[in-house]
Image (tube, grey):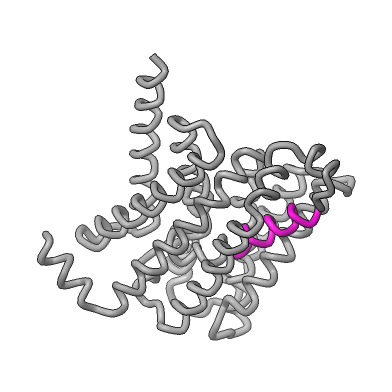
Amino acid sequence: MIDTLLMYLSHSFVRYAFIVGVLIALCASLLGVILVLKRFSYIGDGLSHVAFGAMAVAAVVGLTDEMILTLPVTILSAVILLWSGQNAKIKGDAAIAMISVGALAVGYLLMNMFPTSSNVSGDVCTTLFGSFSILTLTGAEVILCAFLSVTVVVLFILFYNRIFSVTFDESFARAVGTKVNAFNLLIAVIIAVIIVTAMNLVGSLLVSALVIFPALSAMRVFKSFLSVTICSAILSVVCTLAGMVVSILYSTPVGSTIVAVDILFFAVFSLAGKILKK
């Protein structure tokens, strides 16, 4: 088994996949803690549907790089969802449901009306649940993912204290002069970037699991914000690497395998949390 894995790792495209997987897992885990604590977990699911719709439009119009359209559309949707949740007549979950379901339906409709291949069902399944497309990444795509991931990590570290205050008590953060709306907007934009970059790894329907499960697992055992964040980051990377190794060795779907490993670790951490409380 080790020899087989080393043989696969001798190929550059497999190494690219592992690099991108680790970067995406790290970024997703950092934002996952914030989303769970702010009760914004559902935003990731909504934005993933929007990204699916944008990818369908990009495929129909023949864009060679789907991210050119998908990334700005998803970011715009994140901003709209944040604004609608605070100011509009259509609040929170209703706005997310409208945008996400609408984008999912329009995307699927366009892919059927203007098919770009003879296997539309296969294309849809690949986009929704992920596939081995992570193994077809080019060097340029890896560089772009690395740039976006490093940007997310740097922003999180630079604004850690303010993100902490906004996450736990917006009223207090606003009272001490923190621009709460600006930081909520920053969080929304970063979420959109992570969603788009993670779709090649786990598919649009499974992105939320990549974001949420490590944070929930860490919270079963740890209590402080810093310890939960660190544990979530480590756990997310470990689960992603383990899922990708199993996927490569046993030819299982990458996204589903990673999520299955996340579920397994969640069960282990939940059990460990109950034992530690006794």
In the drawing, does residue 237 fall left or right of residue 36?
A: left
Residue found 34% across the figure and 51% down from its top:
238
Q: Mark yes or no: residue 29 visible.
A: yes
Q: Mark yes or no: residue 121 visible.
A: no
Q: Position of residue 27 (x, y in %)?
A: 51, 58
Q: Is residue 191 magenta?
A: yes
Residue found 76% across the figure and 59% down from its top:
79
**Residue 122 sits above or below residue 116 on the image:** above
**Residue 85 sits above or below residue 153 on the image:** above
Residue found 11% across the figure and 59% down from its top:
1
Q: Position of residue 157 (x, y in %)?
A: 58, 57
- How many marks can you see? 0
Q: Nearer the viewer, residue 214 or 78?
A: 214
User: Which span of residues is magenta-colored?
Assistant: 181-193
Image quarter for residue 16? Answer: bottom left
Question: Residue reaching furthest top?
Answer: 278
Residue found 47% across the figure and 51% down from its top:
210
Magenta part, dominant SS? helix
Q: Position of residue 266 (x, y in %)?
A: 40, 36
